């Protein structure tokens, strides 16, 4: 039995998550079928121990029970990624030096691309520039929630126009007081940025760090803040 390096499997799984077809549409196009073939090749590896679940999910994704199959595949890919990360390289952590603005952009873009159902982005200084810079990378079926405080009057109109043009679901809310910057992906993963999203790598070094042990508590704090914040039209 051939055993593959877990780091190589992680790289392939993370690319599969980033390129997953939109859950809201059929997966019968050639590109989607090719993607499913890649999924089957990876999840069938004996060392992962998910062959049976993967086989059922792929069959469902190609049948009348496609929604259950699609979401099962999403869960299995996330499960494999987390398990292998814990065994090898650990949680995502990116250090960005001063001036490395593209490295910061590219790292945050890859996180945003992972969302499939819901993404909550928290940054007191988020403004209109954030919209064209990052929102085009959010998948179409994903509900976008933006929580800011300082520049909401500029952020909200840009978000509304983006939503209108791209048939996206976006809600902007104003928080009365907050300091840190976070991205919460599908309620399953959370990342903290050392700088505001528009300043990453511009004037000083910064980091993007996955939240692990405190994820549940931090997510609850910001979900409660979202629930108690003022919606902006």
Image (cartoon, rainbow, N blue to C red):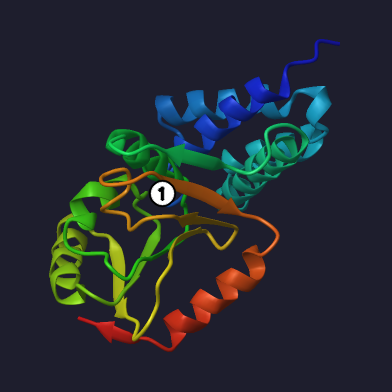
In depth, the one of 43 and 29 nearer the eye is: 43
**Is 71 on the left or on the right of 85, as rendered?**
left
- Mark 1 Cα-neighbour bin, 10 Å: few <14, some 14–19, many ≥20: many
Q: Which residue is painted at 40% across and 72% down in the image?
A: 179
Left or right of residue 170, residue 67 in this image: right
Please indicate whether residue 59 sits to the left or right of residue 31 in the image. Answer: right
The image quadrant that residue 86 belongs to is top right
Disc 1 target residue: 112
- Vertical placement of residue 42 versus 232, above or below: above
- 119 up-or-down from 58: above or below: below
Quadrant for the N terminus, please: top right
Asked if residue 64 can be seen in this view, the reply is: no
Residue at the (31%, 65%) spot, across then down: 169
Residue 161 place in picture, x, y as percent: 13, 63
Q: Quadrant of residue 193?
A: bottom left
| Image quadrant containing the C terminus | bottom left
Q: Residue at x 72, y 36 (%)?
A: 54
Q: Position of residue 92 (x, y in %)?
A: 57, 42
Disc 1 secondary structure class: helix
Q: From the viewer's perspective, is residue 171 above or below residue 30?
A: below
């Amino acid at each position: 039995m051939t055993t593959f390096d877990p780091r190589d499997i992680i790289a392939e799984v993370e690319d599969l998550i980033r390129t997953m077809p939109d859950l809201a549409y059929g997966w019968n196009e050639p590109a989607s079928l090719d993607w499913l073939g890649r999924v089957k090749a990876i999840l069938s590896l004996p060392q992962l121990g998910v062959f049976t679940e993967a086989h059922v999910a792929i069959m469902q994704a190609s049948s009348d029970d496609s929604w259950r199959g699609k979401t099962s595949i999403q869960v299995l890919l996330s499960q494999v990624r987390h398990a292998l990360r814990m065994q090898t390289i650990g949680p995502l952590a990116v250090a960005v030096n001063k001036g490395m603005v593209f490295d910061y952009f590219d790292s945050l873009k890859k996180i945003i691309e992972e969302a499939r159902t819901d993404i909550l982005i928290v940054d007191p200084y988020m403004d209109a520039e954030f919209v064209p810079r990052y929102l085009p990378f959010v998948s179409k079926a994903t509900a976008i929630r933006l929580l800011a405080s300082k520049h909401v009057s500029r952020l909200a109109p840009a978000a509304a126009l983006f939503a209108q043009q791209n048939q996206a679901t976006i809600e902007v809310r104003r928080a009365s007081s907050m300091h840190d910057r976070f991205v919460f992906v599908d309620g399953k993963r959370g990342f903290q940025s050392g700088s505001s999203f528009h300043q990453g790598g511009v004037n000083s070094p910064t980091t993007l760090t996955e939240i692990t042990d405190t994820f549940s508590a931090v997510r609850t704090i910001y979900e409660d803040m979202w629930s108690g914040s003022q919606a902006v039209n």
